[in-house]
């Protein structure tokens, strides 16, 4: 499941960067700004928020949620970076 999660976040990050790049008339600055903003909005509004931890299990759930958010942002950002390097200026 984690492999699928990373694969789709890579795919979405690369596709979003490329689409915004071409819509912004090949401006990488606008593509980067919109990619970062959308990635952060997805993490804030799509992922569930951490809950108050009453037990050790709840702490582990919160840490796993934090790790999944970090993996998502890392995959999205690295795909956007690779797409940025592949596209001409």
Image: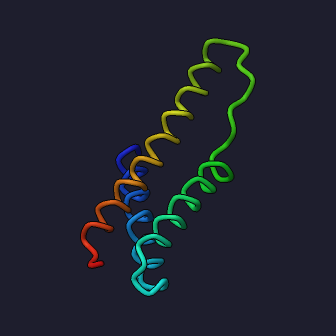
Residue shown at the point (43%, 50%) measured from the top left? 5
Q: Position of residue 67 (x, y in %)?
A: 49, 34
Q: Is residue 82 above or below residue 56?
A: below
Q: How is the image coloured?
A: rainbow
Residue shown at the point (56%, 21%) measured from the top left? 60
The residue lying toward the viewer, choosing from 67 and 39, is 39
Q: Is residue 65 above or below residue 52?
A: below
Q: Position of residue 88 (x, y in %)?
A: 26, 78
Quarter holding the N terminus?
top left
Q: Is residue 66 left or right of residue 80?
A: right
Q: Is residue 53 left or right of residue 72?
A: right
Quarter holding the C terminus?
bottom left
Q: Position of residue 23 (x, y in %)?
A: 48, 85
Q: Is residue 44 left or right of residue 63?
A: right
The residue lying toward the viewer, choosing from 25 and 55, is 25
The residue lying toward the viewer, choosing from 10 and 81, is 81
Q: Which quadrant of the structure image shows residue 61?
A: top right
Residue shown at the point (69%, 38%) measured from the top left? 49
Q: Position of residue 21 (x, y in %)?
A: 42, 78
Numbered label tally: 0
Residue shown at the point (63%, 47%) measured from the top left? 47
The residue lying toward the viewer, choosing from 31 and 66, is 31
Q: Is residue 33 above or below residue 73?
A: below
């Amino acid at each position: 499941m984690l492999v699928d999660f990373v694969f789709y976040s890579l795919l979405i990050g690369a596709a979003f960067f490329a689409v915004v790049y071409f819509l912004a008339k090949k401006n990488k600055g606008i593509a980067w700004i919109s990619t970062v903003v959308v990635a952060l909005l997805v993490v804030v509004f799509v992922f569930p928020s951490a809950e108050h931890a009453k037990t050790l299990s709840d702490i582990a759930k919160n840490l796993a949620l934090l790790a999944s958010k970090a993996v998502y942002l890392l995959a999205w950002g690295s795909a956007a970076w690779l797409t940025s390097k592949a596209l001409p200026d």
